[in-house]
């Protein structure tokens, strides 16, 4: 089964500063390494950690999940924002986004389990 492509964008003004990251994940067969050329290595690593954290939180092992794209700005993007966007994109690709929510904690973006309805 092919994993659907999913994106998640964080674009918010918080504490007088912008937070921005737009991450796309999908099936590894869609991977085009040229899409990631020029992306700072720390942000690529943060996105990969976000993908793996999401899979672990959902109790899944899905080696076909690949980081397809990271859109960023050098001013408003940081590792925490990229990590959170990658986590939420991965959850969205498995139609489980509603199980999680973004929160700010100690000035950082974090993903936590959604509270039961």
Image: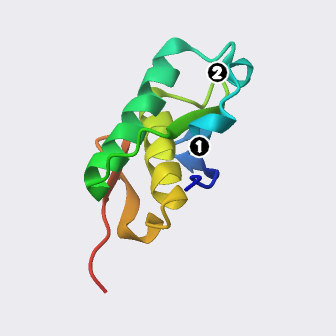
Q: Position of residue 17 (x, y in %)?
A: 55, 37
Q: Position of residue 27 (x, y in %)?
A: 59, 43
> What residue is rendered at 27% in x and 81% in y?
116
Q: Residue furthest front?
A: 1
Are the two marked residues, 2 and 1, in contact with CB atoms closer than 8 angstroms? no
- SS at mark 2 in the image: loop
Tell me how the rendering is colored.
rainbow
- SS at mark 1 in the image: strand
Res 73 → quadrant: top right
Q: Is residue 45 above or below residue 115?
A: above
Quadrant where the C terminus is found in the figure: bottom left
Horizontal side, residue 83 vs residue 74: left or right: left
Residue 15 seen by the camera: no
Q: Tag 1: Cα neighbours inside 10 Å, few (<14), some, or many (≥20)?
A: many
In whole angstroms, how far apart are the C-alphas of marks 2 and 1?
A: 27 Å
Res 100 → quadrant: bottom left
> What residue is rendered at 68% in x and 37% in y?
30
> What residue is rendered at 32% in x and 69% in y?
114
Q: Tag 2: Cα neighbours inside 10 Å, few (<14), some, or many (≥20)?
A: few
Question: Depth check: 50 or 18 in front?
Answer: 50
Q: Which residue is mark 1?
A: 27
Question: Depth check: 107 or 67 in front?
Answer: 67
> What residue is rendered at 39% in x and 62% in y?
101
Q: Residue furthest bottom?
A: 117
Q: Position of residue 9 (x, y in %)?
A: 62, 49
Residue 95 seen by the camera: yes
Q: Which mark is residue 74?
A: 2
Q: Is residue 37 above or below residue 65?
A: above
């Amino acid at each position: 089964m092919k994993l659907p492509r999913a994106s998640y964008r964080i674009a918010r003004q918080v504490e007088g500063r912008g937070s921005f990251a737009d991450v796309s994940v999908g099936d590894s067969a869609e991977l085009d390494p040229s899409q990631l050329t020029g992306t700072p290595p720390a942000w690529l690593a943060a996105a990969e950690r976000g993908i793996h954290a999401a899979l672990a939180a959902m109790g899944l092992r899905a080696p076909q999940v690949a980081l397809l794209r990271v859109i960023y700005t050098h001013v408003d993007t940081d590792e925490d924002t990229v990590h959170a966007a990658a986590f939420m994109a991965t959850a969205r690709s498995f139609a489980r986004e509603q199980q999680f929510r973004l929160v700010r904690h100690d000035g950082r973006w974090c993903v936590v389990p959604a509270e039961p309805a």
